[in-house]
């Protein structure tokens, strides 16, 4: 990234991997404002480990102010963007010279770090209290969660239901088969090409129905399916034509929003054809992201 020091105003929307790294990197060469609805950064690849070991979160949840010591933080959702400023749900109007959109996927988490820590403790208690657990979704999240629980709580009866014909369709068949064999070796029951009607499950009932008419008995469940991209707020803004049908933002090779010189998108929200994971978002900053400030 080319750096300057002329004090331009850089507004970063989103405090995930990509947005936090951009804000941290630019805080001493520009006037940086980070807009995020939560007060902390979370290391996403540690989330599932934290569900089985809540104390892990003490190291993986970092308040934005702990690393962004020379910038402004607005704890709110962005709701609109114009040619010159970003508007937030709390009524703030934040002017920018450069705008970086890094909102990633829509993930509704608590506002404060302490609330998030409590949430992990509650999820851990949910796992510990259950004799049988249903995991819905056989993508990377579902497979990893099943693995974490199977290792730390081998006495639990685990069932994983996936709508696809194999686990983690985005990777090669050989790796998917290896994952399946490992789960089976840990006595995880895996059901393919089925869905689960979670809406029909009432509080206190432990019977789940699949689309094949099978019944699964479980004390609790975890829904591990893909989350939508957090770009709905852009649909009625000056960037509405830059959002594709999947919710991704169209960018050029330098991660500039197409047709814009001073607006960028970075991380999962972009239409860059790649697996949407934190490591790739970090690589955007190192390899693609370029502008003069």
Image (cartoon, grey):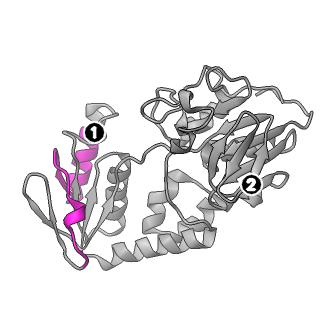
Give me the residue at 35% from left, 76% from top. Answer: 128
Q: Can you tell which quarter of the image residue 9 is in? A: top right
Give residue 81's position: percent from left, percent from top. Answer: 67, 40
Q: Quadrant of the C terminus?
A: top right
Q: Which mark is residue 176?
A: 1
Residue 211, magenta (yes or no): no
Q: How many marks?
A: 2
Give me the residue at 76% from left, 59% from top. Answer: 65
* Residue 158 vertical position relative to residue 267 in the rendered view, above or below: below
**Segment colored magenta:** 177-203
Q: CA distance from mark 2 to mark 1?
A: 47 Å
Q: Can you tell which of label 2 and label 1 is closer to the viewer?
A: 2
Q: Residue furthest right?
A: 6
Q: In the depicted view, which residue is nearer to us: 144 or 291? A: 291
Q: Which mark is residue 92?
A: 2
In the displayed structure, does residue 73 sit left or right of residue 121? right
In the displayed structure, does residue 156 sit left or right of residue 96? left
Give residue 58's position: percent from left, percent from top. Answer: 61, 68
Give residue 109's position: percent from left, percent from top. Answer: 52, 62
Q: In the depicted view, which residue is nearer to us: 198 or 135? A: 198
Q: Earlier in the sequence, mark 2 or mark 1?
A: 2
Label 1: which secondary element? helix
């Amino acid at each position: 990234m080319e750096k300057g020091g002329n004090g331009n105003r850089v507004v970063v929307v989103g405090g995930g991997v990509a947005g936090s790294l951009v804000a941290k990197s630019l805080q001493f060469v520009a006037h940086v404002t980070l807009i995020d609805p939560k007060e902390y950064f979370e290391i996403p690849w540690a989330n599932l480990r934290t569900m089985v070991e809540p104390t892990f979160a003490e190291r993986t949840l970092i308040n934005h102010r702990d690393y962004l010591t020379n910038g402004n933080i607005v704890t709110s959702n962005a709701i609109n963007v114009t040619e010159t400023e970003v508007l937030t749900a709390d009524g703030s109007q934040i002017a920018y010279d450069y705008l970086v959109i890094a909102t990633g996927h829509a993930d509704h988490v608590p506002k404060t770090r302490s609330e998030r820590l409590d949430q992990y403790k509650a999820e851990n208690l949910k796992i510990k209290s259950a004799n049988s657990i249903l995991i819905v979704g056989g993508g990377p999240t579902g497979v990893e969660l099943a693995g974490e629980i199977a290792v730390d709580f081998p006495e639990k009866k685990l069932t994983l239901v996936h709508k696809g014909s194999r686990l983690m369709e985005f990777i090669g068949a050989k790796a998917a088969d290896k994952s399946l064999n490992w789960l089976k070796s840990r006595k995880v029951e895996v059901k393919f090409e089925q869905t689960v009607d979670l809406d029909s499950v009432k509080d206190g009932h432990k019977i789940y129905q699949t689309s094949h008419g099978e019944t699964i008995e479980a004390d609790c469940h975890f829904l591990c399916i893909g989350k939508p991209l957090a770009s709905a707020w852009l649909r009625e803004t000056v960037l509405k034509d830059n959002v594709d049908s999947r919710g991704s933002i169209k960018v050029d090779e330098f991660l500039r929003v197409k047709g814009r010189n001073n607006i960028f998108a970075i991380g999962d929200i972009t239409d860059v054809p790649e697996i949407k994971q934190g490591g790739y978002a970090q690589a955007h900053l190192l390899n693609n992201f370029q502008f003069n400030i």
